């Protein structure tokens, strides 16, 4: 594998840190710009919704442009957007600064994963996706800590900008020129779209991510209002959550490799149980620390379960196409979850937000017992498990 693939992995870390980094400082931004916490939540949901809408189209519109140039453009846009966010005079400007780079967000994934597979196969793809997995569990606590350490919410965006700048320089100086290849239409796409199980899996993916982010998107606010933690304690709790998430990602991969259906259903049940505990014991400091550890441990399974469940029976020549649909589904789910969570908070308060997550998890758990797969496309659990040998590479 070529060493410059690590530059792509760091780029992945940068753009995901920008996407999720606002989660830890939503309460601070709500106070700074005098908006409600549910309105501040649109900084996450609007970003995700923009990615979901642009994902199926943006790569096709730029098919003839040098791939290195495009990836540098994406990271450059993220550097500038974070700087604009840091100097935003009002909430409207901050929202614009968040949404504009989101249109380019899918470009990086579509290009970097395709290039990585071409240059180094599954190992290279796994390396790039490692940047994503680390960002999803560490991006939030480090940006939250930056804001707390400097006692300034702007520090969070400055840190995200520096990360994206380092990734930009890595691409610029270490990645060779990558001329665009003549486009070739994917075969088997129309056949895949006729499979009703695919659409059921995509719906389940949306609901799963909506369930996760309806509560996780407001975790900092929950810890502040319900658990009565200060900024430093919240930063430590988010770091604990992320650290346990890394362990949980590894455990989920092992479990899914043995039995996909059982592991998926166990994920839903466990996350429901943990959020019930958060509702009843979230106001007590020590129990909440333990609950957060378990929450982080289980939470990352929600990134793996939908991907493995959806892609296990997809022909190889249609995997890239299906992954693009999954990218949209993930971000639709994130946006939907943040929106629904905000509505619950506005009407019933922060503590009640877990009930929205529980309801969505219960619905998705019920859907897991529905199968629309055709007999000719069915695979055994053993065959499906083989697809999970390297779970990180199909994380998004």
Image (spheres, rainbow, N blue to C red):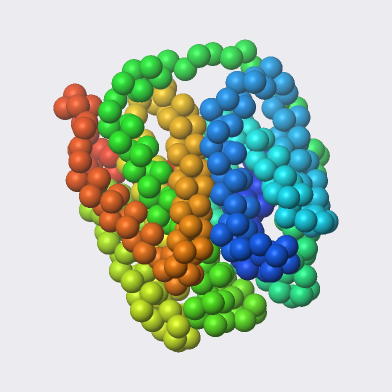
Q: In the rendering, at what x and y percent does residue 293 appear?
A: 44, 73
Residue 328 in sight = yes
Q: In this view, does 131 lie above or below 32?
A: above
Q: In the rendering, at what x and y percent does residue 128 appear?
A: 58, 44
109 and 352: which one is in front?
A: 352
Q: Is residue 166 above or below residue 283?
A: above
Residue drawn 76% across the image and 75% down it: 151
Residue drawn 48% across the image and 86% down it: 285
360 relative to 159 in the view: left or right: left
Residue drawn 35% across the image and 39% down it: 203
Residue 263 in sight = no
Q: In the rendering, at what x and y percent does residue 134 appear?
A: 56, 56
Q: In this view, does 366 lie above or below 64?
A: below
Q: In the rendering, at what x and y percent does residue 163 appear?
A: 74, 54
330 and 314: which one is in front?
A: 330
376 and 56: which one is in front?
A: 56
Report the quarter where the N terminus lies: top right
Residue drawn 34% across the image and 54% down it: 360
308 relative to 328 in the view: left or right: left
Taking the view exactly as shown, the residue that stands out farthest to the front is: 347
* Total numbered circles: 0
Q: Is residue 2 above or below residue 69?
A: below
Hey, which quadrant is residue 32 in on the image? bottom right
């Amino acid at each position: 594998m070529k060493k410059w693939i690590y530059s792509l992995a760091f780029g992945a870390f940068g753009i995901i840190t920008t996407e999720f980094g606002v989660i830890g400082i939503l309460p601070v931004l709500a106070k700074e710009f005098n908006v409600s916490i549910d309105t501040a939540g649109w900084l996450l949901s609007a970003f995700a919704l923009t990615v979901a809408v642009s994902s199926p189209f943006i790569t096709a519109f730029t098919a003839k442009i040098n791939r290195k140039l495009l990836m540098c453009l994406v990271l450059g846009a993220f550097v500038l957007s974070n700087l604009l966010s840091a100097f935003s005079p009002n909430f409207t400007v901050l929202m614009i600064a968040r949404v504009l780079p989101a249109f380019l967000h899918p470009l990086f994934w579509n290009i970097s994963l395709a290039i990585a597979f071409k240059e180094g196969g599954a190992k290279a793809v796994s390396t790039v996706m490692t940047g994503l997995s680390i960002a999803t569990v560490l991006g939030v606590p480090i940006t939250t800590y930056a804001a707390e350490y400097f006692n300034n919410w702007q520090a969070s965006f400055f840190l995200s900008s520096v990360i994206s700048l380092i990734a930009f320089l890595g691409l610029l100086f270490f990645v060779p020129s990558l001329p665009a290849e003549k486009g070739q239409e994917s075969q088997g796409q129309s056949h895949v779209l006729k499979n009703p199980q695919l659409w059921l899996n995509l719906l389940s993916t949306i609901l799963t991510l909506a369930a996760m982010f309806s509560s996780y998107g407001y975790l900092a606010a929950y810890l502040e209002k319900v658990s009565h933690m200060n900024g430093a304690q919240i930063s430590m709790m988010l770091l604990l959550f992320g650290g346990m998430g890394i362990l949980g990602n590894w455990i989920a991969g092992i479990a899914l490799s043995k039995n996909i259906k059982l592991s998926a259903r166990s994920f839903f049940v466990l996350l429901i149980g943990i959020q019930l505990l958060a509702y009843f014991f979230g106001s007590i400091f020590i129990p909440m620390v333990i609950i957060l550890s378990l929450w982080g441990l289980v939470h990352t399974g929600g990134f793996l379960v939908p991907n493995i469940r959806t892609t296990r029976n997809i022909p190889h020549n249609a995997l890239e196409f299906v992954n693009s649909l999954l990218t949209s589904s993930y971000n639709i789910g994130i946006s939907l979850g943040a929106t629904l969570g905000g509505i619950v908070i506005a009407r019933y308060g922060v503590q009640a937000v877990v009930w929205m997550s529980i309801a969505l998890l219960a619905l998705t758990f019920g859907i897991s017992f529905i199968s629309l797969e055709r007999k000719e496309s069915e695979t055994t659990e053993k065959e499906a498990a083989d697809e999970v040998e390297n779970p990180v590479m199909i994380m998004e």
